[in-house]
Amino acid sequence: MLFDEIKKITKYRFNLNEDKADENEIVESIKRGVEFKGVNLWTLIFAIFIASIGLNTNSTAVIIGAMLISPLMGPIMGIGLGAAILDLELIKKALKNLLFATVIALLASSIYFFLSPLHEAKSELLARTNPTIWDVLIALFGGLTGIIEGSRKNIGNAIPGVAIATALMPPLCTAGFGLAIGNFTFLIGAFYLYLINCFFICLSTYWIIKLLRFKKVESVNQPVQNIIKRLIIIFSVAIIAPTLYFGYVLVKQELFTKNANEYITNEIISDSLFVINKKIKASDNSIELVVLGDDLNEKKLAHIKRKKNNYGLEESNLIITNAKTGIETGEENYSKIIDELFLTNKSNLSKKDSLINILKKEQFISQKLKIDEKSLLKEFNILFGKTNLFSVNKTIIFDDTYKAKDTLVILYVNPKEKTMDFPKDKIKEWLKARTKSKEAKVIIE
């Protein structure tokens, strides 16, 4: 009774036939997206360039945009549908179009990256070159979501998310980048990720169509159907196997890094010993540290090394350099550190000296050009008569080599009355004596 109740609830909750679109409509909808011509082809080309630019400039938003408009899902789902309903013509057509789209994408992205002045492999490109088992799971669950959503009467908002999650366009364009710069590691790694996504989207479509019990187009005998199933299993194993290895390596490296950080924090860092530089190389099983402290002697160093075993780091290569005493890596490394510190300090001191000299020059010039205008105005009024306007300034005279030669003082006066006649030569001599300048210019208006 309990089992029947659980079965009933499960069937009610997980029923895929509810809100399912008409079978013929689903088939026709997938078939329409299979062929690359006209709008589909132009959309593909534009998506290729958008994705390539996004990868080239390391822009996540641009890459997401390319994923959303990419029409590559069409022929992949077409292959899965054809395999499920035994439509051999649809399988051939979908395979031919997928191959055509793949070649176009590779050529277009290769041309872009070949012409682009930016050839540095940034994080968005590097992320598509080393697929793991998690990429398989993403492609599988993304494909399942896509075909389930695509088989509904009212398609919801899951399709854009599937396009982003399964990410067909970025790895294909990354493969184009590898082709353009002649880096076959990039080419193979990225194209492998593309194949993973294609295969498991196709497999997801196959499973859901079989689960929904679509009518078969052709009557194929049981041995042939068994061959198809065996081929699916063989391809699945062949594609998954390398990702399991890469996933294992990734987990191992993450665990090494985590254990190494815990080891450094718990066993090395103390009140009298500081880590001033740290390099954890999980790929090489090595830990390189530069420390500063007085208590790192041979006994302490041996104790630290023994503690590695408590953190699963038995096989790791620990290199510790004491910046103060040169322990572990020898005098050569110690001297190198001291030399680097000396050169850095020397450079900093040189910059400071230059800045001080500039400030001194500015202060000297400022003092040299300083004039007490109020005192000069009072003296001028007593000696030569009152003015309507009065202005006096000092400036520096440069020669043709831009070297400071002397100072020039300029006096501008405007008589209070037009009938006043100021003695220009006497004013000039008074001005030079008063401001201690060799050159003076008097302007009277």
Image: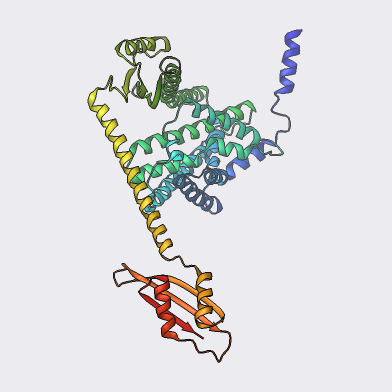
Image height of 9 relative to 87, above or below: above
In percent of width and height, residue 340 lies at 29, 35
Image height of 278 relative to 343, above or below: above
Picture quarter with the N terminus: top right
Question: What residue do we see at 50% from left, 73% from top?
Answer: 376
Question: What residue do we see at 69% from left, 28% from top?
Answer: 16
Question: What residue do we see at 42% from left, 77% from top?
Answer: 430
Scheme of image coloration: rainbow
On the rendered structure, is 211 left or right of 116?
right
On the rendered structure, is 222 left or right of 234?
right
Residue 219 showing in the rendered view: no
- Residue sticking out furthest to the bottom: 419
The front one of 143 and 380 is 380
The front one of 176 and 54 is 54
Question: What residue do we see at 57% from left, 34% from top?
Answer: 81
In percent of width and height, residue 25 lies at 67, 40
In percent of width and height, residue 172 lies at 45, 41
- Residue sticking out furthest to the left: 332
Image height of 365 relative to 209, above or below: below
Residue 260 showing in the rendered view: yes
- Residue sticking out furthest to the top: 1
In percent of width and height, residue 7 lies at 72, 15
Q: How many marks?
A: 0
- Residue sticking out furthest to the front: 382
